[in-house]
Amino acid sequence: MSVGKGLVVLLTLYLLYQTVFTAPDAFLDWGSILRAGVQSPLNYLLLVVALLIPLNWGVEARKWQLLGQKVEPLSFGRAYRAVMVGLTLGFITPNRLGDYAGRVLELKSHQRLQSIGAVFIGRFCQLVATLLMGTLGLLYFVFKFLFSQYPAVSLSLMVMLVALCAVAVVLLYNAKALVAVVEAIKPLKSFVRYIAIIGSYTSSEITKLLWLSLGRYLVFLLQFVLLLVLFRVELTWMEYLSGVSGTFFLKSVVPSVSLLSDLGVRELSAMYLFGLLGQARLQVLSASLSLWVLNIAMPSLVGVGFVLRLRLAKRKEVTA
């Protein structure tokens, strides 16, 4: 398994290198693009994107507050701290698996391992929001670039996308059935106690979590669009929305195995989709990497302080 993950990471890095850095003077061009963005009359957009970072993770904290209350009452402040710890630990683990550990460690209840299921349902809600919005974006590309020449293939893709969304929504609202399936599989039966909590969320609670997930998605989408505008990627509003939502969709369905979170998958997806729209790859790459630095890398550094505080708190707890 580890060899396979290593190969995928190397392949991703190789494709990024081939796509970007083999072009003549690519490094010089990329540096000039970044400088032009910072010195641009539109550089205030960078401040707007930065101001949206706390909102982005604040919505996620609100989701965790609602999810975690099945285990123990959570204040918004504690929920925000747990999200930051999870973000930092997830930053250095494939598929952000450290996010589970970070949020669980912030709980005080002796039953806190049961919250693993709560983390899962929160992430699944975010995935469903991404699939729903991303499907709309990809349908735009199907109609624009495929349908006239390959109608049969286009219809097949459309059916697959709609079916994927339908299955995801049905699973989300029928979590008890998912628990029953896991329980029926002998090797997985021992894990049921850790995910059984997902069957305790009502349809109204799931709907509220899904709306919050869509809200967070829209914040993230707005940040990406603003960065694209800053780096002179000039498109219609429909192309912006379709390109960004399609990028997020592809990033979500392609397994991420990089130790730097989703770095690589999103960049390749963005360059491909916006390349179809006739946009320069380095401008798109600059926007995508800036989004990653602002929303993942920088908050992860902030989260280090919370991780250290958590370790000290646990040490005091043990000493006492």
Image (tube, grey):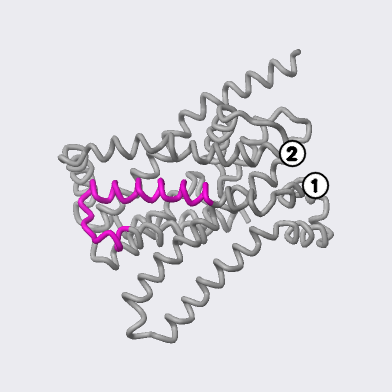
The C terminus: image quadrant: top right
The residue that label 2 is drawn on is 113
Q: Earlier in the sequence, mark 1 or mark 2?
A: 2
Is residue 88 shown left or right of residue 191? left
**Residue at horizontal 33%, vertical 85%?**
149
Decide: marks 1, 2 in contact (CB < 8 A)? Answer: yes
Residues in magenta, as a range:
211-240
Taking 172 as reference, is 108 above or below it?
Answer: above
Q: Residues within 10 Å of mark 1 (few under 14, many from 20)?
A: some
Quadrant in the picture for residue 255: bottom right
Residue 24 picture location, percent across and down: 20, 56
Name the residue nearer the viewer: 100 or 166.
Answer: 166
Is residue 169 shown left or right of residue 8? right
**Residue at horizontal 34%, vertical 64%?**
273
Amino acid on which the number 2 mark rests in the picture: Leu
Amino acid on which the number 1 mark rests in the picture: Arg
The residue that label 1 is drawn on is 193
Query: Is residue 178 part of the magenta span, yes or no?
Result: no
Name the residue nearer the viewer: 82 or 70.
Answer: 70
| Magenta segment, prevailing SS (helix, strand or loop) | helix
Quadrant in the picture for residue 188: bottom right
The N terminus: image quadrant: bottom right
* Secondary structure state at the residue bearing disc 2: helix
Cα–Cα gap, marks 1 and 2: 9 Å
Residue 66 picture location, percent across and down: 62, 40
**Residue at horizontal 49%, vertical 62%?**
132
Q: Please identify the residue farthest to the front as the structure is shown.
A: 204
